Amino acid sequence: MTKLVSVLLGVGMLLVAHALPAQALFESLQALPPLQNARVINSSQQEAVEKIYPLGSVRRISGRLRYTGEVLLHGQQSVLTVQLASTHTAGDAFMAARDYLEQHDAQMLFWCEGKDCGPSNLWANAVFDTARLYGPDEQQSYAAFIQPKDGSLITVYAITRGNGRSLLHFEQLAADSMPSDLRPTPATLLRQLREGGKLMLTHLPAEPEPQWLALLVRTLNQSAAFRVVIGGENAALWYEELIAAGVKANRVELDSAENSKLYLQLIQ
């Protein structure tokens, strides 16, 4: 009997250890000021889930759900849905969650706001299977992140419903295997750069790599209305490759000091 109890306890500890990353993440997110006093609507976990996560806007075409970008994953899924206190907005809570994840080394893959995301009813019913997340299209936000440390995908969806109630929905899927070619969309990088004025490129390799180089070129060439500085570690190498790849030299300046991680910063 003692041996059996010991085995069961060991199995229980393994399950707890496996579940802890999502549990710890959700507890940390709920401790953020805009999420304090939020009411938990759903907190659940499934051991084996196969799901397509959008990495682009959502549409229904000829009766079928279509994404401009997506990733299919299989693994353990953890879900948390909260209703914010009336003193906090969905926008502020979404921003706080987004900033927290980025500060803890999560890499944003996709970010959309309002009608750019697609119809809210598709996000609520088809993507997240949670009807209460439905609201006006212009009142929604969505972001997807990859957490390289533990090979998980984290999604955040915020909505202010027609009745004025604000909800945040989080999902974390600890994937059995994660595609190695997942990278942000150019529109997402441009949105991050415009929003914060500075974009940290800590996930880029030390030496310019063709896929990342092409992504930065596409990002910078989406708009000719702004100029940037590139600085930090190995910035000179990336600067030279960006110019060689077709970014106009008058739109990029080099900060040769390597006293920080690689970054892009808007020139005001």
Image (spheres, rainbow, N blue to C red):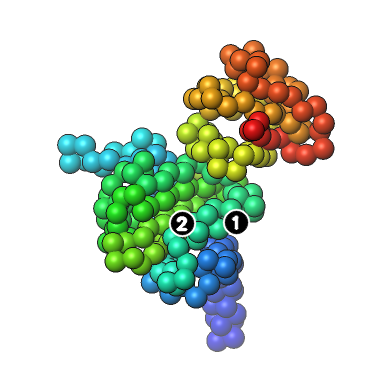
> 2 or 125: nearer the eye?
125
Labels 1 and 2: the sequence-earlier one: 2
Please give the residue where the numbered disc 2 appears in the rendered image. 91
Indicate left or right for 105 with 113 as reference. right
| x and y, in percent, of residue 173 in the image | 47, 54
> 194 or 182: nearer the eye?
194
As measured in the structure, the alpha-carbon distance from the residue carrying label 1 to the one carrying label 2 is 14 Å
Residues under numbered marks 1 and 2 in contact, where contact means CB atoms less than 8 Å apart: no
Q: Residue at x 70, y 29 (%)?
A: 230
Residue 136's place in the image compared with 63, above or below, is below
> 92 or 181: nearer the eye?
92
| x and y, in percent, of residue 187 in the image | 47, 34
Answer yes or no: is residue 46 visible.
no
Answer yes or no: is residue 104 visible.
yes
Front position among marks 1 and 2? 2
Q: Residue at x 60, y 17 (%)?
A: 247
Q: Quarter of the image containing the N terminus?
A: bottom right
Instruction: Give, as a three-letter code, the residue at label 2.
Output: Gly
Q: Residue at x 55, y 58 (%)?
A: 96
| x and y, in percent, of residue 237 in the image | 73, 22
